[in-house]
Amino acid sequence: MIKKTLIVIAAALAIYLAFRYCEFKDNSSTTIDETALIQEQIKNVGKLVVTEGHFSEVVTYKDEKKYLLDFYSAEKKAIVIVNADVTVAYDLSKVTYDINEATKTITITNIPKEEIKISPDLQYYDVQENNFNKFHGEDYNKINAQVKETMRKKIEKSTLKTNAQNRLISELQKILILTNTMGWTLQYNGQAVTDESISKTLM
């Protein structure tokens, strides 16, 4: 009788352990599948997002040198017509993240800063120089630097950077949609990212 009872208990325990093993195996496999899917989505998002713009500007360059105790001055100047192609790019292959399978949390640890490239075409008009103050290579370097600084200020006031940021958020939103669908949480800077907060949280 005791022997029969022990056999029944052993059989029941074996069935229970087998059931728990299968349940654990299924959950483990599901988590692995979800992790692989998230990593694949991030890999797909990891591309170069480029927003292009064109700007025009008129820049006046002046330089003056004084001689004979400021009694005589020699001036050189030029009017420069600038046409510049500008790109604002985000290299999303530089996005880094951590995955916590236990808590089903993906934490973005780094979002790359935008890369601004300015390619100016300069045309010089009304170039005036003096025998005591002629144009040299250094002047053209100063003009180029002045042009780029002027272009950067125009970019800041334009919608180009905002448009680029919107495209960045659109790409990162693909990760958010996937994690939400699978019941995972997306975090950045210690905050959970949601549809409502994504633009404020990530930028």
Image (tube, helix red, strand yellow):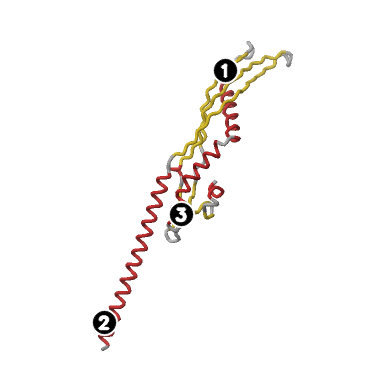
Does residue 152 sit above or below 106 in this rendering?
above
Total marks drawn? Answer: 3
User: Where residue 20 appears, x then y in whole percent?
Assistant: 34, 70
- The amino acid at mark 1 is Tyr
User: Where residue 29 appears, x then y in whole percent?
Assistant: 34, 60
User: Where residue 91 appears, x then y in whole percent?
Assistant: 46, 40
How far apart are the two marked residues, 1 and 3, measured between alpha carbons? 54 Å
Label annotation for residue 106: 3
Label annotation for residue 7: 2
Does residue 11 sit above or below 126 in this rendering?
below
Q: Residue at x 74, y 14 (%)?
A: 71
- The amino acid at mark 3 is Ile
- The amino acid at mark 2 is Ile
Quadrant containing the N terminus in the rendered view: bottom left
Q: Residues within 10 Å of mark 1 (few under 14, many from 20)?
A: few
The mark nearer the N terminus, 2 or 1, is: 2
Q: Residue at x 47, y 36 (%)?
A: 50
From this viewpoint, which residue is outermost toward the bottom?
1
The mark nearer the N terminus, 2 or 3, is: 2
Does residue 19 sit above or below 87 in this rendering?
below
Dot 3 falls on a residue whose secondary structure is strand
Q: Residue at x 57, y 17 (%)?
A: 124
Dot 2 falls on a residue whose secondary structure is helix
Where on the picture, by quarter, is residue 133? top right
Label annotation for residue 124: 1
Q: Is residue 138 left or right of residue 64?
A: left
From this viewpoint, which residue is outermost toward the top?
131
